[in-house]
Image (tube, rainbow, N blue to C red):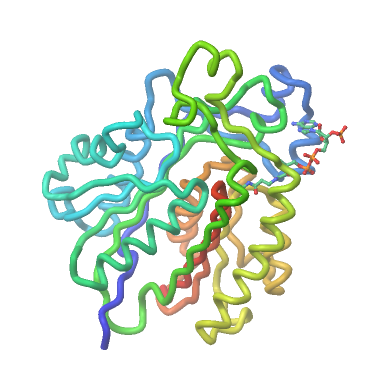
Amino acid sequence: MPLKSRISGTGSYAPENVLSNLDLEKKVDTSDEWITERTGIRERRIVKKGQTTSDLCLEASKKALEAASLAPKDLDMIIVATMSGDMPMPSTAAILQKKLGAKHAAAFDLNAACSGFLFGLSVADKFIRTGASQKLLLVGAEVNSRFIDWKDRSTCVLFGDGAGAAVIEPARGKSGIMSTELHTDGSLWDYICLPGGGSQHPPTAKTVRDRMHFIRMKGNETFKVAVRTLEKLVVNTLKANNVDPSQLAMLIPHQANLRIITATAQRLKLPMNRVAVNVDRYGNTSSASIPIALDEVVREGRIKTGDYVLLEAFGSGLTWASALIRW
Ligand code: UT7
């Protein structure tokens, strides 16, 4: 039987500080009603002063390692999917390696924005299946709150901070990752971007004045592409693996907007009790949203061995991705 990879442990962490829609009403011209109706978000978590992306990674990773009964020194690879790392260089994965004490692990970051965890899962799957890695830690983590324009009501109500982690190990038998599918359309890069601070617009007083170091999004245009693309993606992924939607135990979607999640579930005729939803409590945590939702579903005992679990994401790039897992 060919070698596969499987998720052997999950963990997640969200900062304690809760920012509710009512709190946001005091900051910008918005309302709890608008945010809830248009997005499904009720509150989000925000880091405290001094808390960084690698700090969130550390908490989620410790839980995932414990669930997989592994110690940090057992790891041979760490991948952190993030677009809001501690600093541009070195990687947040390198800083996490130090904080964990995982000195045998090669560590690097990967940026596919909100699709980052699934891009990372696909890379991890290849490393494990080729035998190049035996014990891999994959983390999706974001401190979005430091890259948000708190004066822009069209974006500041959407995002939150958090981290989710998964340990990936070799598997033989029926359980394991069945397929991963990755897509990018770079022609739509400006739908969601953070234009300042890179080689195109290095930081200057002007880039700061022009608020170029914050996330910008063409929300409505992105929404339409997301719904259309994800509906097609989930149908195609199941078809390619000969799995009927009725056989699906759980859909774990990226958590950007409850309306997008519901549309995808309806396309598969899935009842909402078979869909993981936490956008109401965390908002959009970008690359962390899927691993946080996965960890919650695992810990609540909502998936069991042998179940089909479908993960899907959509984000800046534009990128979109899916993974089908036999749990
Ligand atoms: O995670 C990566 C992928 N991201 C996504 O998939 C996000 C996709 N987009 C969305 O989720 C939705 O497009 C949003 C939630 C961002 C926006 O919802 P929408 O239904 O597309 O609203 P809209 O942008 O078309 O704006 C409708 C109205 C506008 O006012 P007018 O022009 O109709 O007078 C906005 O100015 O709502 C206004 N608006 C707000 N009003 C109150 C925008 N933001 C707010 C706000 N509070 N926070």
Residue at 30%, 71% in the rendered image: 5
Could you tell me residue 71's position as x and y percent? 17, 51
Residue 155 appears in which quarter of the rendering? Answer: top right
Q: Quadrant of the N terminus?
A: bottom left
Q: Is residue 22 left or right of residue 7?
A: right
Q: Is residue 226 left or right of residue 293?
A: right
Residue at the top extreme of this rendering: 205
Residue 291 in sight: yes
Q: Is residue 23 left or right of residue 4?
A: right
Residue 203 appears in which quarter of the rendering? Answer: top left
Residue at the front extreme of this rendering: 200
Q: Quadrant of the C terminus?
A: bottom left
Q: Is residue 249 left or right of residue 69?
A: right
Residue 235's place in the image compared with 195, above or below, is below
Residue 65's place in the image compared with 92, above or below, is below
Residue at 57%, 58% in the rendered image: 253
Residue 139's place in the image compared with 36, above or below, is below
Residue at 21%, 35% in the rendered image: 99
Of residue 222 and residue 97, the one placed in the foreground of this image is 222
Of residue 122 and residue 172, the one placed in the foreground of this image is 122
Q: Ligand 1 is in which quadrant of the figure?
A: top right
Of residue 225 and residue 150, the one placed in the foreground of this image is 225
Residue 108's place in the image compared with 26, above or below, is below
Could you tell me residue 144's position as x and y percent? 51, 33
Residue 12 in sight: no
Residue at 29%, 62% in the rendered image: 168
Residue 198 appears in which quarter of the rendering? Answer: top left
Could you tell me residue 228's position as x and y percent? 71, 62
Of residue 282 and residue 110, the one placed in the foreground of this image is 110
Could you tell me residue 277's position as x and y percent? 60, 54
